[in-house]
Every structure is written in C-alpha cells, then in structure tokens.
Amino acid sequence: MWCFGVLLALGSGVATAAGVTDAMIKNDTASNDDLLTVGLGLHGQRHSPLTQVNPNTIGDLVPAWTFSLGGEKQRGQQAQPLIHNGKMFITGSYSRIWALDVKTGRRIWGYEHRLPDGIMPCCDVINRGAGLYGDLVIFGTLDARLIALNQDTGKVVWNEKLGDYKAGYSYTAAPLIVDGLVITGVSGGEFGIVGKVDARDAKTGKLIWSRPTVEGHMGTLNGKDNGITGKLNASWPGDMWKYGGAATWLGCTYADDTKLVYCGTGNPAPWNAHLRPGDNLYSTSTLAIDVKTGKIKWSYQSTPNDHWDFDGVNEFIPFDLKDGTKAGAKADRNGFFYVIDRTNGKLINASPFVTKQTWASGVDLKTGRPIESNNRPGDPAKVSADKGESVFSAPSFLGGKNWMPMAYSPDTGLFYVPSNEWGMDIWNEPITYKKGAAYLGAGFNIKPLYDDYIGALRAIDPNTGKIVWEAKNDAPLWGGVMTTAGNLVFTGTPEGYFKAFDAKTGKELWKFQTGSGVIGQPATWEMDGEQYVAVLSGWGGAVPLWGGDVAKKVKDISQGGMVWVFKLHKSGGQVAAQH
C-alpha cells in the first residue's frame, strides 16, 4: 500500500539487518546485547539481568551521547528505545520514528508520517514505541494506521488501517509481536469507538484475527466470523453497545506457558454511567486471549459499570508467586493492586496502593467484585438539569496509576509502581452519540490530595499487597519504571530528573537533570563489554491537557524531545552527573 510519509536518510555505515526471529523475541529478557520488545520481554516485567551499573558504581554514570528529536514537535516523548544490529530504533510524538547508530547517536534515517487533518487523540500526540520482526520495524500512528518499515533504509514495506480516524480511532501503543503475529489495540474510548485486539501477519500486515472488546460485536479469524464477544445485551442496555468504548489503548503482554496474550480494556462509553446500566462487559477488564484463535479464554473486570473513567487498561505482568502460583499483577487506575491467576483469571488478592479510595472500601475476594461506596455522580435526567449532582472522588480519573508501566524484579520479588495521589470533582451531563465528537457526558476538575507531594514510586510485595517502601515526588509521576539485577530501579520525573533508587530500600542513589520532564520508558543493554542506560525526555501527555488544578501546578515545566544515553565514566573528560 502507498504510505504518505516523509523519509530522511543518511549514509549508514551500520551493518544491514539480521532478521529478528520468534526465538530471539522470546529470549529477549536473557539477551543482554539487544532490546527487541517494549517491556524488556514479552511479559513486560521491565527487568534486566545486567549488573555492571549498581549501587557501588552508579555515581559514575554519565552521558555517553544524546539525540534531539528536533523541529517544533517537542512534547510528549513516552517511548522505549529498541536495540538491534548496531541500531537504536526510537519513536517520537506526532507519529515519527528514527534509526540511530547505537554507538554514537548518529541519525541513519528518520520517517515522519503525514497525519491528516481531523485526527482526535484524546490525550496528546504521543507514541509509546515500536516492535521488531525479520528486517522490519513496526509502529502505529495517530490516524490509526500500522506501518512496517525496513530497518536498514526506513522505506515503507506495508501500511494497514486499524480504524477510522474520523470516528475517533487512533493508535499510540507499542505493538507486541508473538509467533509471527503483530498484536495491536486501538485508542478512542472518549469518542465512542469499539475497542478490539487485532493480530496480523508481521511480515505482510495481513489481518489474521480480530477480537472486539465490547459485548455483542463479532470477532473474525482468517476473514470468517469467529463468534461474538460475550452475549448481546447481557450487560448493555439497548443499542449502547454499538458505541461502547473499551479501547485497548495500552497494548498487551504475553506468557509463553499459557499461550495467552493479556490485554487491558478502557472505560465504557459514555462516561455518564446512568445511560448504560449493567456491568458493560468487557470494558475495564483484563482479557486473556488465545494467541492463535483470538478467542477470549478468561476475563476479569475491575470496575463494573465504570462511572469514574478508571479504565482497566493497565498492563498485566505475568510472574510467579512464592508458592509457585502462575500469577499476573496489575496496578489499576482505580487504586487497587490486583494479583490474578494467569491460567484461569481467578482473583488471588487485591490491595490498595494509594492512600484514598472514595469509590470502594475494598474488593470481595470471593466474588472478585469491588465493595462499592456511595460515590457515584448524580443523574442529570432525574433533576431535569444540564448537570447532575457533583461528587468528590479519589483517585481521579487519571488514576492511582495511569499508562506509565510498572516493573517487577525477580531478585527482590517486588513490583515498583509509579503512583499518584489526587482526586476530582466529577459530575454527569446529558450526552448522545455523534460520530467524531467527544462522547463523555461528564465534567471534572482534578485536585491534589496533599500539599507536599502527588507522585510516589512504591515498592509492593505481591504476596501480601503491602507497600515495602515509597519515594515521594512533588509533581505527578508519568514515566515508566525499570529494574536491574544490579539492585537498581530507574524512573523519571516531570521536573526533568532521571533517577536511580536502591531496589531493596528505596534510597535515591543518583539523579541527572535532562532539561525536560522524563515520561519515557527506561532501557538498558550491553555493548562492547559496557552497560548502557537510556531514556527519552520530553514533557507532555495527559496531565497538562486534562489535569485541572494539577495542570496549573506543572504549567512551567519545559517541553522537549531528547534521547539520553548513559554509561559508566571512563577517563577522558566526560560530562559529570548530578548526584
């Protein structure tokens, strides 16, 4: 297919691509000299076995090189770098992608997708990364397309449509590649799109299967009907399911022992839940989908009949409990940290990881359902008004944890969760569906809960649900987390700092000022016997757009667009770090 885009290439001097195989992708976590998946492995644990950078050496971590994403598009850099065959692949805001010489940061090629007028990304113009397969690098765009480019030249090989951008579809997540299939979701729940998970042939882009995430819609397998999702009108009234949301905007993880992909789904549409009584399956859920057939094997819904835009889209990370149980963990926007049996979806434990939850007092471990408090906004239809009764609710709809991925360390057995303490005034308004228009039926204002901090990096024991340590931050945390076998936890802050903590104690060991908010996803790899660490810097995302009173608090943070790459200092006058 023809792709409208701009390719800017420079002479390479870097070896041509050796094909990325399924075996290499499944071994990504153990392979130190490349990074083939966003999440440092298909399970998304974001853990590296590298140890050269550790508490004893971290003070000597200094910049090795930087790369500017350039131009006027300096905001919202949320991607994780990928490393293969001498190249770094990095995506940027506004649907851009580059290949860089991993040793020097020299630009090899860049591709900028030509976006049409009228795109409708709800939560900034961000992109969260790419995938590698064969000689291709694959990434998605804000007009809901999936594009495969040649790793060596940046030329488009195939270009497929994920949804109609005029109806509100977009795509910002990193694709997941499993057994030759590229797995994608869609964004657009605020516009009444219908969420879905698609699987395509990674070499050709051909659609293999599609699984809608709203009850009543038909799935497909090899171009044929593959059964509807759920049962028509079982948990949706009337025709509300036709525009039901449940966007799969954060992507998926995979466990090879179950052969299941785990995908989170977003809010039901509209936000005004009075218009859609019922649980509204399969919104606000984790879905376990057979990677070969596209059939849902199990589901777990964290916020039935979601009235607060909590979603359930947060990443589900497979891991094993101390007793050997094959589990998975999820820090939900609703403020609960869930541990679920990854083989059958049975809830094992659910514990709060934020300090205030007005909407529920807990989760019933027998039924798996929340124990709701009386904290739903009022129905405007009952008072014949343009606005129903407002309530104060915590967490805010931006969540106890939003998109920013947590990390797991098999060495400490802890999860490291970037969490935020905020609440909101929320009220409902009348709304009807109109293609391409916002479909909320709600108003809101987000407020900090405390004067001294909003963000808190928290280490959580999944066996008990207890918080082992926390590191507070003035501004809300909005970047990903990474752990290493060197007993380190890396993450960034909106204030511009890239930081490292002791994984066992939470002691801050190192920080470096990048010049703009760090909301990217850290990465690390080994090259020529040295460990490298990288992160993107560039403030943006949902907080300055939707953050209410919190947005005012962070209004002076500079935007930006830089790749920062670090390694341990050697003699020769490298830049000194701040610590």
Image (spheres, grey):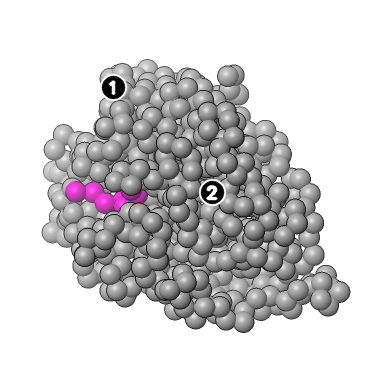
Q: Which residue lies under the disc numbered 1?
A: 18
Q: Position of residue 360 (x, y in %)?
A: 53, 78
| x 16%, y 34%: residue | 528
Residue 331 visible to the viewer: yes
Q: Residue furthest right?
A: 384
Residue 261 appears left or right of 184: left
Q: Residue at x 62, y 52 (%)?
A: 231
Q: Quadrant of residue 372?
A: bottom right
Name which of mark 2 and mark 1 comes first in the sequence: 1
Q: Is residue 171 among the parts visible in the rendering? A: no
- Region in magenta: 42-49
- In the image, is 515 to the left or to the right of 470? right
Q: Residue at x 56, y 37 (%)?
A: 226
Closer to us: 281 or 565: 281
Q: Given the image, on which type of amino acid does mark 1 rest? A: Ala
Residue at image mark 2:
248
